[in-house]
Amino acid sequence: MTFRRTVRFKREFQLLPPEIKRAARSKFALFSRNWRHPSLRLHKLEGILWHGRPVFDLWVTDKCRVLFVIDHDVVVSFSIGPHSIVSKQTRLPRVRRLALDGRHLRFSQRAARRKGLEARNSTTCSVHG
């Protein structure tokens, strides 16, 4: 498994206190050895997508979380901070897809409404007019 970090994650990590950084590094090491370890309290956040992928929450301390996605065998960490980062992710626009000649184009709900698309379910849209 390969681990990647976004620029946003790196920026947020640099702002953390040293004791949280140490705890985060030890949790990352544990995650790379055994991602099912109970102390990680790893779980999927229902209904939240980041670039079309389901978001997972990893427990660092009682007040600090890491949000990440898994794309095949690559783990991409994109946010670290207090538990409130989880509620911020629920306010992001949901991703909708439009199948067009076998290709998938992504639209947020707002963009879909602007373009005259009606979301039928969580993964498809249809064109009117």
Image (spheres, rainbow, N blue to C red):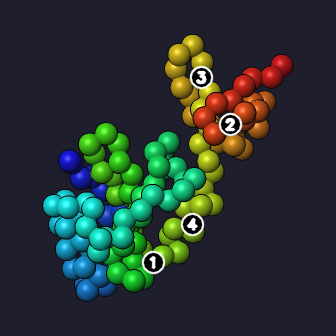
Work out whether mark 4 precedes mark 1 in sequence or the reverse, and give the earlier one. 1
Tell me, yes or no, whether the two marked residues, 1 and 2, touch with CB atoms within 8 Å.
Answer: no
Label 4, label 3: how far apart the Cα atoms are: 29 Å
Residue type at the position of mark 2: Asn
Q: Mark 2 points at which residue?
A: 121
Q: What is the x, y in percent for residue 92?
A: 60, 56
Measured along the vertical axis of the image, is residue 106 above or below residue 65? Answer: above
How many marks on residues?
A: 4
Q: Name the residue under label 3.
A: 99
Q: Which of marks 2 and 3 is in front?
A: 2
Q: What is the x, y in percent for residue 115?
A: 74, 31
Disc 4 secondary structure class: helix
Work out whether mark 2 precedes mark 4 in sequence or the reverse, and give the earlier one. 4
Closer-to-camera residue (23/113): 23
Based on the displayed image, in which of its 4 quarters is residue 18 positioned? Answer: bottom left
Disc 3 secondary structure class: strand
Q: Mark 4 points at which residue?
A: 88
Q: Tell me, yes or no, if residue 36 can be seen here.
A: yes
The answer to whether residue 43 is left or right of residue 22 is right
Disc 1 secondary structure class: strand
Q: How crowded is mark 3: few (under 14 residues within 10 Å), some or many (20 or more)?
A: few
Measured along the vertical axis of the image, is residue 62 above or below residue 85? Answer: below
